[in-house]
Every structure is written in structure tokens, then in C-alpha cells.
Image (tube, rainbow, N blue to C red):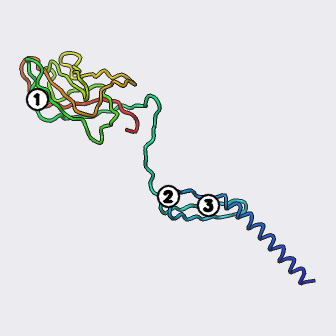
């Protein structure tokens, strides 16, 4: 009789263990890590009562890189500015515009989507400069300061227009003196808009 009770207890314990193990294995199979470029993934599974917690430690998941469209339709833009020193002195002539000085706006800190609103001239006594003008990259006409002695040239920026003038590229500028020839070293501040993320 004692042997029968012992055998029954062992049998019941075995059935209970099988049920518990089966339940745990079913719960555990629902936790699946997904990496398609991993060589080693360490998984720790801790079971307490009816709760299973896992920690995944990846040893070799590489950085994913790529491109993604961030806007559909008209993009969101933000304002920016760039200080430019076209290099060397230039002489504004009183008989007409000076020879054209060309300069490049380029570099990693210059956004590719930049479109220019206006350009402000520094480094000159504006009483000596009657007129000055700019030709934007890939443009075929000049933008001129609004009034005599005005240090600003506006480039007719229109929100969401595809015809706004590009920031990046080769520019041209020329100056006309008020009374007599005037030599100075120009510097420019360019105000522009560019897309977020550029």
C-alpha cells in the first residue's frame, strides 16, 4: 500500500511537471527576436508565475542607413542666413557698373534646397555706392538694390514657388559709385529659406 501511494505521488508529480513545462514552453515560443543581419543574439527568459520577461542582447546588429521622403506636396521650410566674403577689394565706378565680380556659395554647411530671399551688403560706405546688383546661380538677369544707396537687394522670393533663386552655386555682382570711383572690400549676408532636414 505504501508503495502504491509512493508510485501515485510520483505519477502525479510527473503529470504536474509535464503540464507546467508544456505551459511554459508554449508561452516561451511566443517570444521571438527578429534580426535579419545578426550573427549572435543572447536571449534571457525569466518566468515568474504567469509573467514571462525577456532581455535581448545583440552583439552584431549593424547600423541601417538609407533615404526617406519627409514631405509630400510643398515642403516645410525654415529661415537661414550665410555670411559670404567674396574676396579682395573691388572698385565701384561712377561712369557705370564696375566689372562683374564672380564668387561661389558652396560648402557642407550650405543647404542644397536653399532659396534666396535677399542679400545685404557690408564693408562699404553706402553714401559712396549709388547702385549695386547681383546675378544668382543659373539666372540670366540682374537683381538691383531697390533705391539709391540701399544696402539690400531683394530677390523676389515667393513662398512655395519653384522659380525662387538658388543659394548654392556661382554668383555675380557689380557696383556703381555715386560721384567718383570708390574702392572697398565687400562682404555679404544672404537670407534664405531651406527645407527641414537639409
* Residue at (11% x, 23% y) in the render: 98
Q: Does residue 91 appear left or right of residue 141 in this picture?
A: left
> Is 5 or 15 nearer to us in this picture?
15
Gap between marks 2 and 1 measured at Cα:
59 Å
Residue lying at the far top of the rendered structure: 147
Residue receiving disc 3: 54
Check disc 2: other Cα within 10 Å, few if <14, some if 14-19, many if 20+.
few
| Number of residue marks | 3
Q: Is label 2 in a helix, a strand or a loop? A: loop
| Residue 118 at x, y percent in the picture | 28, 25
Gap between marks 2 and 3 measured at Cα:
21 Å
Residue lying at the far left of the rendered structure: 180
| Residue 50 at x, y percent in the picture | 72, 60
Q: Is label 1 in a helix, a strand or a loop? A: strand
| Residue 130 at x, y percent in the picture | 15, 18
Residue receiving disc 2: 37
* Residue at (74% x, 63% y) in the render: 23
Splitting the image into 4 quarters, where does residue 171 fall?
A: top left
Check disc 3: other Cα within 10 Å, few if <14, some if 14-19, many if 20+.
few
Q: Is label 3 in a helix, a strand or a loop? A: strand
Q: Does residue 4 appear left or right of residue 70 in this picture?
A: right
Q: In the drawing, what numbered circle is on residue 90?
A: 1
Q: In the drawing, what numbered circle is on residue 76?
A: none
Label 1 vs 3, first from the N-terminus: 3
Amino acid at each position: 500500500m505504501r508503495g502504491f501511494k509512493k508510485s501515485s505521488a510520483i505519477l502525479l508529480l510527473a503529470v504536474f511537471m509535464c503540464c507546467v513545462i508544456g505551459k511554459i514552453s508554449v508561452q516561451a515560443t511566443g517570444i521571438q527576436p527578429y534580426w535579419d543581419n545578426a550573427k549572435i543574439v543572447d536571449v534571457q527568459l525569466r518566468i515568474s508565475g504567469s509573467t514571462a520577461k525577456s532581455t535581448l542582447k545583440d552583439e552584431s546588429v549593424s547600423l541601417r542607413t538609407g533615404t526617406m521622403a519627409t514631405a509630400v506636396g510643398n515642403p516645410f521650410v525654415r529661415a537661414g542666413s550665410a555670411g559670404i566674403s567674396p574676396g579682395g577689394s573691388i572698385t565701384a565706378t561712377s561712369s557705370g557698373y564696375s566689372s562683374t565680380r564672380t564668387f561661389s556659395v558652396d560648402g557642407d554647411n550650405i543647404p542644397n534646397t536653399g532659396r534666396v530671399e535677399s542679400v545685404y551688403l557690408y564693408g562699404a560706405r553706402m553714401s559712396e555706392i549709388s547702385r549695386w546688383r547681383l546675378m544668382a546661380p543659373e539666372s540670366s538677369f540682374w537683381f538691383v538694390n531697390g533705391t539709391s544707396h540701399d544696402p539690400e537687394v531683394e530677390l523676389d522670393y515667393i513662398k512655395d514657388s519653384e522659380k525662387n533663386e538658388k543659394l548654392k552655386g556661382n554668383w555675380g555682382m557689380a557696383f556703381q559709385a555715386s560721384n567718383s570711383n570708390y574702392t572697398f572690400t565687400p562682404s555679404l549676408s544672404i537670407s534664405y529659406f531651406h527645407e527641414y532636414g537639409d
